[in-house]
Amino acid sequence: MSKLEWPTLFGMRERKDALAAYRDRVIYMLAIVGMLVMLPIAVKNFVQGQIALGVGDAAGILVLAVDALAIRFRRRPPIPFALILIPAILGVALTLRWQGFSGVLWSYPLVLLFHFVLSRRVANAYCMLLLIGTGGAVYHLIGLDATVRYCVTLLLTVILINLALNIVDDLHRRLIAQTTVDPLTGAYNRRHMESCLAYAIERSRQTAAPASLLLIDIDHFKRINDQHGHATGDAVLRELVAVVNGHARAGDLLFRTGGEEFLLLLPQTHEDEAVRMAEALRVAVAGEFCTRAAPVTVSIGVSELQRDETMDAWLKHADDALYLAKELGRNRVVHRAGRQPRMPEGARQD
């Protein structure tokens, strides 16, 4: 990632632009196509003596070439497309003046271009600017009847584009959910966990931001399945996720890493605070399920990310703490505290 930001799924609570992840690729392809299309037009304008149009086309080709090269070498385009497209609107208006009503036909591919290279909100604002600017030019040069037909068809085009993008965004969110969310519990899956942990490690290296893990395992889960059936076991998994999410803070992320094992990632959290959260969670789980036919408790291993620690090492230390919690009798929290797993002070001890 060119700038440090959470992986895509961290923003699933928000409405995301499905084209955002592909925008540089789209801009690069459009820049190449734009240069190929504009080059013969620029030559024709120079040959026909339309010097102003020819110079404008040449300038556009140069700008597109600079941005395409930047994207090719994985750099941020030096000239934002949002700025490039403002002269494009003026260009349509000038083309209308020199070429008549046929010049305004460039408005239709232009509104598509807006939505491919700009965010939805900005693209729609540009479309309204285009509609007002070129609509006024059409009215001034041709008349009211042509203006009405032009404005209605252009507005309909913008509406249809937005309807299509709504469908694409919805399909995009569903695809993300299918590939990164556990269908039974609604927690994130192991695949997404790895990308989020990698980000947390990189963020810690760049900013020294702390992060901790809670590795949570349901005690005697096989016994619950054997004695009460898999339907009860599935219900326990779902309700555990609900309890954990109810105690998690904004920004904390829960992943299902195995059959009855979950991992809670706590960004911006030192180990002592993570231990307090783990103990409160352990008590909440025991209280939540205490009246059930199948009593449920959890064991939790806590580990804070250490300087220059790898993902595997970070997970292993949390797993070692969880293993000790189980060895000590389950239904307890154990944290690393340096390199040796230990019980938190004041925690229950059988």
Image (cartoon, helix red, strand yellow):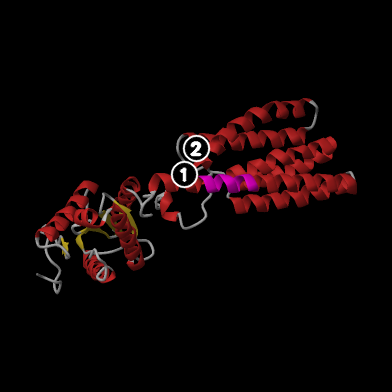
Spot occupied by residue 349 in the image (x, y as percentages of width and height): 10, 70
Spot occupied by residue 306 in the image (x, y as percentages of width and height): 21, 56
How would you rate the neighbour count of disc 1 (Cα within 10 Å): few for under 14, some for 14-19, many for 20 or more?
few
How would you rate the neighbour count of disc 2 (Cα within 10 Å): few for under 14, some for 14-19, many for 20 or more?
some
Q: How many marks?
A: 2
Residue 11, quarter of picture:
bottom left
Q: Is residue 290 above or below residue 67?
A: below
Q: CA distance from mark 1 to mark 2?
A: 27 Å
Residue at 14% across, 62% down: 330
Q: Is residue 149 above or below residue 44?
A: below
Amino acid on which the number 1 mark rests in the picture: Leu
Magenta segment includes 42: no
Q: Nearer the viewer, mark 1 or mark 2?
A: 1
Image quarter of the C terminus: bottom left
Prevailing secondary structure class for the magenta stretch in the rendered image = helix
Residue to which mark 2 is pinned: 71
Residue to which mark 1 is pinned: 175
Mark 2, secondary structure of its residue:
helix
Residue 321 versus residue 242: which sits nearer the camera? 242
Q: Which region is colored magenta?
A: 163-171
